[in-house]
Image (spheres, rainbow, N blue to C red):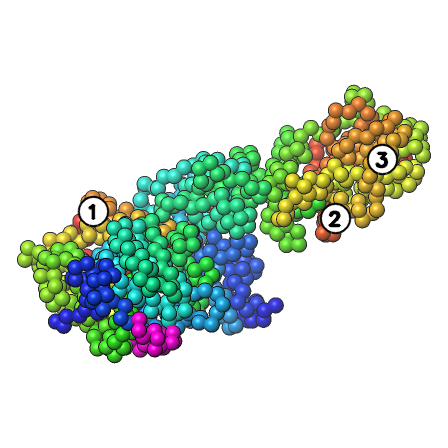
Amino acid sequence: MSQLVKLIIDGQDYEAEQDSLLIQLLIDKEIKVPYFCYHESLGADGNCRMCMVGIEGQKRPQIACDTLIKEGMIVNTKTDTIKQVHTDILELELINHPVDCPTCDQAGECSLQDFYMEYGLHSSKITIEEKVKHNKAIDLGSNVMLDQERCVLCARCTRFTDKITGTHELGIVGRGDEAKVTTMPNRPLSNPYAMNVVDLCPVGALTSKDFRFSQRVWLLESADGVCHGCAKNCSIIIDHNKLKYKDDTIYRFRPRRNDAINGFFICDTGRLSYRELQENRQETPLLDGVKISEDKAIEKAKELILLYKRNTSIIIDANLYTQEIEAIVAFAQEIGADVYAPLDIYRDEAFGDDMLRSSMRAANAQTIINMDINTQKPKKVGLILNFNHPEKFESAATINFLTHTRAETALTLPIATFTESSGSLTNEDGITQFSKKVIHKNIPVPTLIESLKRVSQ
Amino acid sequence: MRECQIVSRKFHIENACTLRVAKEHGAYNSLVKLKEYDPQHITQIIKESMLRGKGGGGAPAGMKWELMPLDDKKPNFLVVNCDESEPGTFKDRQIISKDPHLLIEGIILTCYAIKAKAAYIYIRGEYKEYQEILQNAIDEAYSAGLLKECDITIHRGAGAYICGEKSALLESMEGKRGHPRLKPKQKEPEWFFGNATLVNNVETIATVPFIVKNGADAYRAYGTEKSPGTLLFAMSGHINRPGVYEAEFGTNMLEYINHYGGGIKNGKKLKALIPGGVSCGVLTAKECEGLTLDYEALRSAGSSLGTGGMIVMDEDTNMLEALKNILEFYHEESCGQCTPCREGSGWSDKIVGRILEGNGTKEDLDKLFELADIMNGKTICVFAPSISTVLVSFISKFRDEFEAVVS
Ligand SMILES: Cc1cc2nc3c(=O)[nH]c(=O)nc-3n(C[C@H](O)[C@H](O)[C@H](O)COP(=O)(O)O)c2cc1C
Ligand code: SF4
Ligand code: SF4
Ligand code: SF4
Ligand code: FES
């Protein structure tokens, strides 16, 4: 741990670690300076030259991303000279920018737009009409689309594939104002984390093929969530909305910074998992493949449970919230059932890697282990109560509690998905996160705990 | 005018590029000193000679050599900068084609002083034929057993001006894009794959044998107090005998031009002169009067000595066209890494283009000054500030010509 030193920024006193990056302090303390190329996960590159600040004792403005904090440093971010530099460089940034915000997906979350508002170019000096032309819709691979004209060449994306994934698919070719981001022929962007470049890109140059044109970002609501794609439990932001005449819908998952778990990123599988989460939902109870009323289903379930008393096994999906698992275990004790959570089906060695992805593709497997729940397959029994476990086991009778439809004829009760209920998960490293209900359906599906309550009454 | 032959001594000897002829004329004689001197001593001599880097910046060479760690387990490297792409500059190619063994001799001495076992010569891609001559000389040196202590490898660039900037050069040698690196916070060597590295210009290294052989004083006997020694000055443009002629620092500029260059072509008058490659501010004929060729004199004239490659322009030169020509070069060659340069180089070129077409306005001129200001002191390397220098010097010194064509 480095020594703490004092410094003054815009007349205010601050304390920071000696030799730490000035720009990081400015960002952390929300002291506004424009910047494109710096990103905490990628470090300084110093190419955009936007983060200029005045340092007393230095003749020229300095870039904050390449300035190390020293004792007694006096920093100015708001003097007229510095503001002029910000405006000037921003203006240069815009010379060859198409300014097609109305059709740009980044609009609303674009740094260039934000800085433009902040450092307003009320009397723009731009007089050259003819801009350098580049390609506007290049499919880079992995759902990532590139608009070379919107690119500010901050090199965040190329640094990501160089430094973070080490896959080197993205590069900048050409010099001067002909420089552009690209991939090499027949070497598309293809790595399990590729779509993070869309979040890293400060402008609308990189967009997600999955998300583009689907919603304007200012119409979205953002909520915290946790990815259920594997035992890593990456923290995410769930972007959703409920427009008039429509149901509450998720449009994308984005990484939510969590230094203890996923840092700044998530994998593409997790990112795109919101899609299947909303598709083929089990919305009504079924018996022999035919819709029945909820009351009828509950009644039928109760009958079966009574009939097979002491001859019942309960199967738990290792993706359920801890509170749900606990409720199921308590219920099992009540009716004298055995509890299983077979984990083998979730193991996928090909999925795991040494970055984030775990080969245990179940979000709460750690809780199953912590609670000493039997992870073997159940022995053949009379009745099986399957709480959303992906496998089907042999038995005389079955009651399914399902989030998504299956080709099943057994008695089935619908239950809410993880975004429609609250609860906690513990990841493979023992870190627990709680998530609140985010999605409020027009016609809500009961949560697992609600259904269980009704069945056990 | 005193004849100087510190570097150019064998330039006019036929076949001096071969080892046999070069040896007949004293090549590799300085190597006997290696038996006498330890590495630090050689560096000390270079320091005392006050040899200044001949690649454009004029940084004291000895001080750079001293930054090299001598007791480190990691290897040290020498990289010789032969990218020579500054318009108006064509001196290094004289050395590698006329007297390549002088460079090899300098490399052997330098590697000994900085304890490097390997040297690379980064040569501009277009110098294919000179590269062959140099490679032959290296092969001969290997066969003669001269390169037992250090290896020499030629690394061919792909024709980007920016790769002459030392850190971009090293990035390029590491297999990356030729992008200048951020400046270090303190004095330190350059780094090649994380190993301490010395980068010097071809002519700087080619000067080393003379100094080691004859001593620091012998070198300081030429030139001025602050700019000792000589430089392969060169001339191009409207001059009767363009070419490379070695002269001592402090030589009178106009005398040099008349003596070696035979004066301005067709008996015309001098209008303007760019002293050392296009990155140096342009001088008017009047400013050239009485000016001497040394770092200090050119700095006080508001320009710089650069590489010593002078571009001479006669009275008929259209300064707008000259400026446009230079800006096109910068527009083409900006590495594109940092915003002010990437966008500013192209923008200023386009504005001057418009003025040249007769569509310029007075505001355009103001805009060029504003652009010069944005490009100055705000970029990763000094490429962009050079554009500023060019813009400001051309427009302010030849304002009438520019104002005459704008509305
Ligand atoms: C844009 C740019 C281009 C340069 N091109 C060359 C070059 O072609 N050859 C060269 O020796 N130095 C060139 N330099 C200077 C080098 O960065 C470096 O200072 C020099 O090679 C050091 O050698 P010296 O001290 O012996 O001069 C260039 C610098 C800049 C900023
Ligand atoms: S595509 Fe985006 S992230 Fe990549 S260099 Fe351009 S602006 Fe930066
Ligand atoms: S690594 Fe696992 S938890 Fe993280 S985003 Fe991917 S699937 Fe989700
Ligand atoms: S100033 Fe120009 S040449 Fe130098 S690093 Fe920046 S863009 Fe590249
Ligand atoms: S953030 Fe500092 S130069 Fe880009």
| As drawn, A450 above or below B259 | above
The amino acid type found where label 2 is placed reads Thr
Q: Which mark is in front, 1 or 3?
A: 3
The amino acid type found where label 3 is placed reads Pro
Q: Is B256 positioned to the left or the right of A305 in the image?
A: left
Nearer to us in this view, A81 or A92: A92
Instruction: Tell which subunit mark 2 falls on.
Output: A
Which residue occupies the extreme left position in the image? B267
Residue B356's label in the rendered image is 1
Badge 3 marks a residue whose secondary structure is: loop
Choose top left, top right, bottom left or bottom right for residue A89.
Answer: bottom left
Residue A378's label in the rendered image is 3
The residue that appears at 45% across and 57% down in the rendered structure is A46
Q: Which mark is in front, 2 or 3?
A: 3
Q: Residues within 10 Å of mark 2 (few under 14, many from 20)?
A: many
Q: Is A132 positioned to the left or the right of B294 in the image?
A: right
Q: Which residue is mark 2?
A: A426
Q: Earlier in the sequence, mark 2 or mark 3?
A: 3
Q: Residue A320's x, y, as percent?
A: 76, 40
Instruction: Tell which subunit mark 3 falls on.
Output: A
* Residue A365 seen in the current view: yes
What span is in magenta? Answer: B31-51
| As drawn, A208 above or below B148 | above
